[in-house]
Image (cartoon, grey):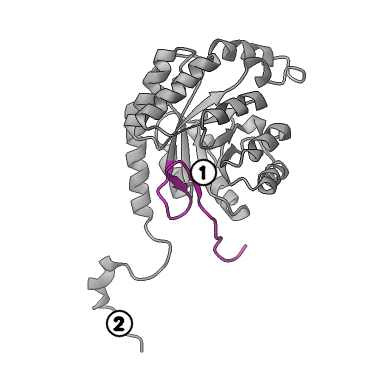
Amino acid sequence: MGGVRQRQPVRIGNCDVGDGHPVCITAELGVNHLGDFTRAKEMVQAAHEAGADLIKFQTYIAEKRYDTQNNPKAHQFIEWVAQWQFDRDVEAQLWEYAADLGATVFTSPFDIESLDFAHSLGSVAYKIAAFELVNHQLLRAVAAKGRPVVFSRGMATKQEIDDAIAIFESAGAPYIILHTISSYPLQKRDSHLRMIHWLREQYDCPVGHSDHTPGTDIAPLAVAAGANMIEKHFTVTPKRRESDNFFSITPDELEELIFRVRQVERYMGRDDIDRIETEDYMWDFRRKTE
């Protein structure tokens, strides 16, 4: 494909996600709180104070979260997430706590009832998890809310991505694609960051990266590859083995990640070939055109 793609940024809260704007950093809290409300509040505060632009929850009804008809193993996952699910009134208190801190929150809804509940709490956007991308009933309901949609492309074919985009575009919902490899945790060697290039070539929307590797090494490389948004799983209890805690980043690591991402943004600089100001001195020594 020739030429430069003109992709419009997508605004989520105070973040303009797209080319020419600072990379938007999302702390994915998910269910790393393990159903402990005090821990969940600690996580929200720590992520906000560490500098996350956005904080993401998961909103669901455990029994509706997995397809048990086609996957008998899903029952085990339902048992786990049922233990970590907040009652609706408790979850509403968590959103209120985040708002009082000044944190910007959105969520991954896993069923339409949970979507409606999150919408009533003021979710500024919605995240579609990779394995929900083919759940067109949920996608249509999310798109109808008219708020920005972030979706992970892990495991998806191009046709499945195109089908999802058609749903969002038909409803006029702006969207962001996150390159994702659906493995938890992910080995760094399996990150396949060139897929970010491919997504940017194929689609006119902002493209980001949901990074499931431990530590902070991959996210800056994803930014250099063209990611406009970074999502990282976040915890305050990295020694816990349940959920995603053991490969999630801590508050100190989140601060380090943000610093490294901002460094990369500076290093990447401009996207034209006009003379840079620091070349002015050497310009005087340049041979003139003959």
* Side (left or right) of 25 relative to 260: right
Which element type, helix, strand or loop, lies under badge 1?
Answer: strand
Residue displayed at 36% across by 36% down: 257
Q: In which quarter of the image is residue 160?
A: top right
Q: Inspect the image, locate mark 1, and give the three-letter code of the amino acid beneath it.
A: Gly
122 is higher (above) or lower (below) than 92: below
Mark number displayed over residue 208: 1
Q: Give the range drawn in magenta.
A: 1-24
Q: x, y percentage for residue 216? A: 39, 34
280 is higher (above) or lower (below) than 243: below
In the picture as drawn, the residue positioned furthest to the front comes out as: 120
In the image, is residue 45 part of the stretch drawn in magenta?
Answer: no
Q: Inspect the image, locate mark 2, and give the three-letter code of the amino acid beneath it.
A: Arg
Mark number displayed over residue 287: 2
Q: Mainly helix, strand or loop, the magenta region?
A: loop
Q: Can residue 183 be seen in this view?
A: no
- Dot 2 crowding, Cα within 10 Å, few <14, some 14–19, many 20+: few
